[in-house]
Amino acid sequence: MSAPGEPTVLRSRENSLFKDLRRLAQDNSAYRQQGRVWIEGDHLCRAALARGLQPVMAVLAERFLPSAPALGLPPGLRRVVVADALWTQLSALESPAAMGFVLDLPASTALDPTAPSVVLDRVQDAGNVGSILRSAGAFGYWQVLALKGTAGLWSPKVLRAGMGAHFGLHLVESLEPQALSALAVPLLVTSSHAGDFLHAAGVPWPCAWAFGHEGQGVGPQVEALAKGRVRIAQPGGEESLNVAAAAAICLHAGMGQRL
């Protein structure tokens, strides 16, 4: 038992807290079960603090403990120190960072009908989802609506790929396609073969962009709700673009027309 104000030190892989932390760090669905989120590394932790988030606990590798004061951790924050020999079993990274935070999973909130939005329709690759979240944040689409079948927005891999974008976005996940009918802004979908070319189309603001499954694209239920269809000119002759690349192009084009 640690004295008040002293860090809890974990030295056994059988410790129940260590097991919970490892599940959060490695299992993409654990955040839903535990109601908490794991972020790892100096960049993500600093991004969370910069956005005013209050961690539930700071988790530090034993070797990192002397450097912890430089982080400016909130007073009274629970600190958990993991023995260096155990840290590589906790982290899912090939080159583990020496620190992480546990955050409370944000409470589920309703869709905002008027917000500039990005809709993710069964986008399954965590790297793609995280990259799209970064583009959404960069170009002013502050609401992201993830339909069922999309990679978990708060899973460790998506959080790493998002590089802190999560903390400035309104995220709603596990939606059914019909929920999009509540949007008061026009819904736009991309296509590889139909619709106006993006560079010649007028992109309304605010609007919602829908991006679909890596292989199948946007599903018919979402497409039926669309107010516009656009395609990206590819004079180089490629058949299609990666969904994260297509999203960045579309979201930037929308921003460019309102500057």
Image: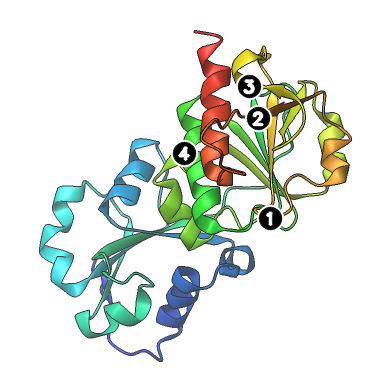
Residue 1 visible (yes or no) = no
Residue at x 27% of width, y 86% of height: 11
Q: Which residue is mark 1?
A: 215
**Crowd rating for badge 2 (residues with CA inside 10 Å; few <14, some 14–19, many 20+):** many
Question: How far is disc 2 from disc 4 in space, using C-alphas?
Answer: 13 Å
Q: CA distance from mark 1 to mark 2?
A: 22 Å
Q: Residue 148: percent from the left, percent from the top?
A: 75, 55
The Cα–Cα distance between marks 4 and 1, rounded to whole angstroms, is: 22 Å
Read off the residue under disc 4. 134
> Is 37 on the left or on the right of 175, as rendered?
left
Q: Residue at x 30, y 45 (%)?
A: 46
Q: Could you tell whether 67 is left or right of 132 in the image?
A: left
Numbered disc 1: secondary structure: loop
Question: What residue would you read off at disc 2?
Answer: 117
Is 66 above or below relative to 69? below
Amino acid found under the numbered disc labelled 2:
Ser
Give the labeled residue for mark 3. 198
On the image, the x and y values in percent for residue 193 come to 74, 35
Callout 4 amino acid: Arg
The local crowd at label 4, few if under 14, some if 14 to 19, many if 20 or more residues have their Cα within 10 Å, is many
